[in-house]
Amino acid sequence: EATEALKETINSTVRSQFVSDVKVGLELSGGVDSSLLAWAAEGSGLEGYSAIPTLDSISEEAHIDHVCSTTSTPSNKIQLDPTSIGQMIGEIAYYHETPINHEGSLGVYMVCQQARKDGTTVLLSGEGADELFGGYHRHRIVSRRMSRARNVSRLLGPFSAVLPRKVKTAHSIWKQRERNLTLATAFASPDMAR
């Protein structure tokens, strides 16, 4: 029942995004999240936009092609090579307004630029699904760390001033859990960003 309810929720949510006065497209990486969107949008005529690196070992072009062929999604591919990245990096940094701390920003910018040239002004994205469903390895690590910190804090919190540093750290992690959970999903620490 839960699987069917989730499937229906995803399908209806994706399809609700088609109600627009402008042309809608899809950022299609070939990963689980954007592929799921393509399957939910099957038959809608939604066009996919993908950034394809020239390095085969990191390219997901085969996955993108599979999704496009099984869902009849038209595909628009933008080649990411050192020359194109070099030409665009200053512009990307300007619009980013912060240090670029994730290489995905380069491809996303170039995909958006191509979509805009094609008259597509809204792109659906699979971003957020891993966060929503705890799909990253770091989520499991943080979950275990928070569980241990909570237990230590509950048992020994009142005595933390006289306990070993390791216990104090666990108590501190639990007391500042919202900050620690937020930073656990960041690509760079505040010190690195500074």
Image (cartoon, helix red, strand yellow):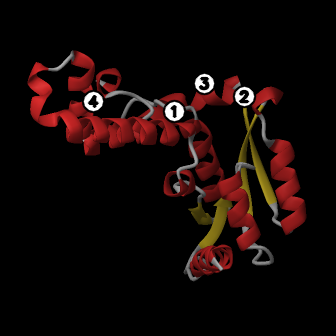
Name the secondary structure under disc 2: loop
Question: Picture quarter containing residue 108?
Answer: top right
Residue 185 seen: no
C-alpha separation, residue under disc 1 versus residue under disc 4:
29 Å
User: At which x and y percent is residue 180?
Assistant: 31, 37
C-alpha separation, residue under disc 2 versus residue under disc 1:
16 Å
User: At which x and y percent is residue 107?
Assistant: 62, 40
From this view, report whether residue 112 is shown above or below residue 22. above
C-alpha separation, residue under disc 1 versus residue under disc 3:
16 Å
Tag count: 4
C-alpha separation, residue under disc 3 versus residue under disc 4:
44 Å
From this view, report whether residue 62 is shown above or below residue 26. above
Badge nearest the viewer, 1 or 3:
1
Which one is earlier in the sequence, the residue at label 1 or at label 4? 1
Name the secondary structure under disc 3: helix
* Image quarter of the N terminus: bottom right
Residue drawn at point x = 36 percent, y = 36 percent: 148
The amino acid type found where label 1 is placed reads: His
Left or right position of 86 against 170: right
Which one is earlier in the sequence, the residue at label 1 or at label 3? 3
Task: Between residue 140 and residue 168, name the one nearer to us.
Answer: 168
Residue 92 seen: yes
User: At which x and y percent is residue 131?
Assistant: 50, 52
From this view, report whether residue 24 is shown above or below residue 15. above
Residue drawn at point x = 82 percent, y = 43 percent: 61
Kindly identify which residue carries mark 2: 81
Tell me, for residue 102, which label it has, or none. Answer: 1
Kindly identify which residue carries mark 4: 170
Residue drawn at point x = 10 percent, y = 35 percent: 158
Which one is earlier in the sequence, the residue at label 3 or at label 2? 2
From this view, report whether residue 16 is shown above or below residue 72. below
